[in-house]
């Protein structure tokens, strides 16, 4: 049993079933998958870290407590465990699982007693170890001792407010866990919308950007979701495309029959059904109930197009602003740089441009202003490459700049990046920084002068200009920038939505997909990010695609001609 966790569960662990009877812990299929991963990681010599996305109740928390007991009894003495949940009642429920295990353990080999009079921390005499429980509202109980095993339960429900931050608390608890062999951290939850800390942690694990191993259990892996089928051949003939996909993914005929029957309880609303009984992790996270962009289209981008940038960089130039800002331009590699590059400025990945020729109207960019403080919106400029359109392809994201920066300096950096990309057409989004940004809660920046855009215009001459008219009896005039308002915002977002649904552009950046997943229709009829999230990349990309597909002249490749120097002359070097 020291080397077979599943055998330990059946021989030594007793659980209280739904009917109230106490019975051996005979693992079901999802539990066997989970147990296999636990044991594999435990004996690997590295810390055991799993993020568990649950579909309904199949005993994941029960198995976690059994695993803690197995480690304490067979492998490490003085190896303490902590459990943190959203509310205290959940913590007590999980503590009750361990108490049942101790009470029913063969020969009474586990004895629990309160630690220093606390009902939240118990001392296991036989293993000289502690197991404590706490809630998000009162996490201090687990801080009274060191711990080597940590169970964070229903993290998707943990609040993120000005008083309590799910991310800050989770990171503080994780910081208290030593990085040693046989240490264990389990972060588990059902999916509760997108944009929260658990959602971001899951995505990082899926991308391989964290030390956590992701484990998702689909509804059809839970044995009780089965319905007998008398005429299987006729039933199979009646399958729709989604049911055929379920079969390919491993669902049995009986499971598909159960799914079809259960769908009637949701009056055929597939989206609601997927929220309660997800087939994939993407379905589990797909909704806050008001999402704007379709989840399947975003998943196509994640699976087919998203990739790590070939370079993280910062922009180097002769001056940060002013007349010399666009001279001696260079992208310098920097792991912490604000510029992510997928297609370098002089690169031609599709070998479309013949020697002695140059591409015209190839790049465009759209700049969305944020602020300089950490809590402010991000300042983002997205550069789109239109060259693939010459071969029947679609626009691709070539580079993206994202930073917290003083808006006037960001305006210059946006122009520098556009200059590096063949003097790309650059549009500044100009509505939000006209207004008071002094919001202490979200960290918005105060109003700043638009005069800097006139200075940029004097140095960079390929800026988007809009027709403006102050009064009906006055002549229209050209003004710098794209005015994002109640008429133009739905227009550019409609282009973005079409491009996602019809796969009419290539997104390289996982951060963009994260924002698409958290962009929603608000209850007041407006559009924006889920509370606590950002939509700056959404706006920047939507604007860039509108320029690329609805505004600019067609891209072309023409023989190189000696052109007169422009005001934006400067060495545009990548290296």
Image (cartoon, rainbow, N blue to C red):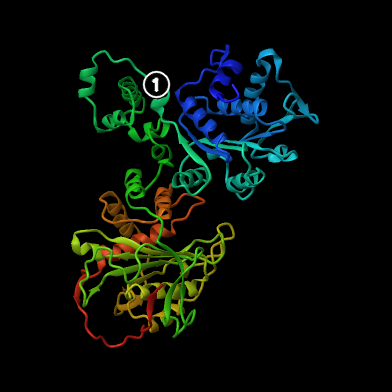
Pick the residue in front: 307 or 254.
Answer: 307
Residue 164 spot, x, y in % from top left: 63, 46
Instruction: Bin the neighbour count of mark 1 within 10 Å (Cα to Cα): few under 14, some 14-19, many 20 and up.
Output: some
Residue at horizontal 28 percent and vertical 67 percent from the top:
348
Which part of the image, by quadrant, shows the N terminus?
Answer: top right
Q: Is residue 407 above or below residue 16?
A: below
175 horizontally vs 274: left or right: right
Occupied quadrant, residue 351: bottom left
347 horizontally vs 525: left or right: left
390 horizontally vs 315: left or right: left
Which part of the image, by quadrant, shows the C terminus?
Answer: bottom left
The residue where tag 1 is placed is 225
Pick the residue in front: 574 or 84.
Answer: 574
Q: Is residue 570 above or below residue 287?
A: below
Pick the residue in front: 379 or 99.
Answer: 99
**Residue 527 seen from this side:** no
Residue 561 spot, x, y in % from top left: 22, 83
Residue 310 spot, x, y in % from top left: 40, 61
- Dot 1 falls on a residue whose secondary structure is loop
Pick the residue in front: 512 or 563.
Answer: 563
**Residue 288 seen from this side:** yes
Residue 440 spot, x, y in % from top left: 59, 60
């Amino acid at each position: 049993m020291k080397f077979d966790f599943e055998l330990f569960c059946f021989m030594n662990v007793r659980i209280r079933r739904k009917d109230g009877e106490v019975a051996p812990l005979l693992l079901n299929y999802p539990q066997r998958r989970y147990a296999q991963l636990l044991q594999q990681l435990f004996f690997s010599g590295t810390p055991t870290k799993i993020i568990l996305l649950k579909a309904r109740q199949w005993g994941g928390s029960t198995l976690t407590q059994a695993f803690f007991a197995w480690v304490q009894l067979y492998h490490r003495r003085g190896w303490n465990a902590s459990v943190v949940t959203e509310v205290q009642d959940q913590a007590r429920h999980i503590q009750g699982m361990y108490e049942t295990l101790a009470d029913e353990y063969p020969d009474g080999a586990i004895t629990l007693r309160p630690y220093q009079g606390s009902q939240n921390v118990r001392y296991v005499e036989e293993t000289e170890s502690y197991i404590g429980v706490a809630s998000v509202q009162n996490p201090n109980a687990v801080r009274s001792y060191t711990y080597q095993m940590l169970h964070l339960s229903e993290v998707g429900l943990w609040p993120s407010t000005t008083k309590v931050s799910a991310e800050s608390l989770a990171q503080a608890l994780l910081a208290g866990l030593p990085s040693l062999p046989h240490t264990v951290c389990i972060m588990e939850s059902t999916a509760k919308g997108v944009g929260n800390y658990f959602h971001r942690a899951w995505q990082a694990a899926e991308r391989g950007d964290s030390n956590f191993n992701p484990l998702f259990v689909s509804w059809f892996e839970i044995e009780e979701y089965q319905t007998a089928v008398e005429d299987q051949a006729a039933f199979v003939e009646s399958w729709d495309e989604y049911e055929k996909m379920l079969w390919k993914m491993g669902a049995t005929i009986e499971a598909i029959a159960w799914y079809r029957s259960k769908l009637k309880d949701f009056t055929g609303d597939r989206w609601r059904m997927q929220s309660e009984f997800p087939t994939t992790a993407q379905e589990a996270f797909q909704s806050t109930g008001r999402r704007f962009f379709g989840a399947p289209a975003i998943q196509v981008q994640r699976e087919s197009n998203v990739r790590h940038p070939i370079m993280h960089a910062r922009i180097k130039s002769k001056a940060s602003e002013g007349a010399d800002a666009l001279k001696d331009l260079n992208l310098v590699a920097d792991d912490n740089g604000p510029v992510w590059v997928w297609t370098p400025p002089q690169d031609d990945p599709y070998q479309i441009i013949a020697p002695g020729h140059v591409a015209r109207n190839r790049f465009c960019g759209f700049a969305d202003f944020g602020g300089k403080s950490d809590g402010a919106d991000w300042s983002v400029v997205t550069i789109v490459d239109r060259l693939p359109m010459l071969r029947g392809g679609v626009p691709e994201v070539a580079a993206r700049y994202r930073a917290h920066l003083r808006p006037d300096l960001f305006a210059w950096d946006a122009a520098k990046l556009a200059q590096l990309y063949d003097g790309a057409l650059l549009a500044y989004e100009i509505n939000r920084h006209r207004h008071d940004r002094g919001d202490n809660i979200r960290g918005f920046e105060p109003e700043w002068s638009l005069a800097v855009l006139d200075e940029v215009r004097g140095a960079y001459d390929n800026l988007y200009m809009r027709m403006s008219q102050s009064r009906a009896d006055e002549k229209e005039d050209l003004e710098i920038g794209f005015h994002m308002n109640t008429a133009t915002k739905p227009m550019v977002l409609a282009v973005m939505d079409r491009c996602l649904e019809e796969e009419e552009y290539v997104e390289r950046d996982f951060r963009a997909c994260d924002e698409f997943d958290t962009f929603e229709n608000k209850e007041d009829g407006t559009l924006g990010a889920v509370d606590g999230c950002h939509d700056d990349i959404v706006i920047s990309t939507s604007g860039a695609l509108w320029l690329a597909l609805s505004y600019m002249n067609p891209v072309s490749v023409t023989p190189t001609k000696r052109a007169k120097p422009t005001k934006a002359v400067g060495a545009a070097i990548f290296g």
